Image (cartoon, rainbow, N blue to C red):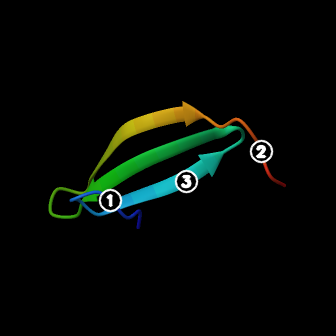
Amino acid sequence: MVEGYDQKVFRVRVGGYRILYYVVFETKTIYVFIIDKRGVVYD
């Protein structure tokens, strides 16, 4: 979970991108609302 958001927001990193999304468990729906390219990729 990511702090600073009202909803239960999760973060995943795919390659050089960071994706923030939240899940509506009642309808089993995932909403992606931020995809940004990170400046530094850590291995």
Q: CA distance from mark 1 to mark 2?
A: 23 Å
Kind of residue at disc 3: Val
Left or right, residue 36 beside residue 21: right
Residue at coordinates 70% horizontally, 38% vertically from top-left?
A: 16
Image quadrant in which you'd find residue 34? top left
The x and y percentages for residue 26 are: 15, 63
Q: Is residue 11 above or below residue 31?
A: below
- Crowd tier of the residue under label 3, counting other residues whose Cα lies within 10 Å: few below 14, some 14–19, many 20 or above: few
The x and y percentages for residue 37 are: 62, 32
Q: CA distance from mark 2 to mark 3?
A: 13 Å
The x and y percentages for residue 17 are: 62, 38
Residue tagged 2: 41
| Label 2 vs label 3, nearer the camera | 2
The N terminus lies in which quarter of the figure?
Answer: bottom left
Point out the tag, 2 or 3, that comes first from the N-terminus.
3
Residue tagged 3: 12
Residue sitting farthest toward the left: 26
- Crowd tier of the residue under label 2, counting other residues whose Cα lies within 10 Å: few below 14, some 14–19, many 20 or above: few
Residue at coordinates 42% horizontally, 59% vertically from top-left?
A: 10
| Label 1 vs label 3, nearer the camera | 1
Kind of residue at disc 1: Gly
Secondary structure under tag 3 reads strand
The C terminus lies in which quarter of the figure?
Answer: bottom right
- Crowd tier of the residue under label 1, counting other residues whose Cα lies within 10 Å: few below 14, some 14–19, many 20 or above: few
Point out the tag, 1 or 2, that comes first from the N-terminus.
1
Point out the tag, 1 or 3, that comes first from the N-terminus.
1
Q: CA distance from mark 1 to mark 3?
A: 16 Å
Q: Which mark is residue 4?
A: 1
Left or right, residue 20 beside residue 26: right
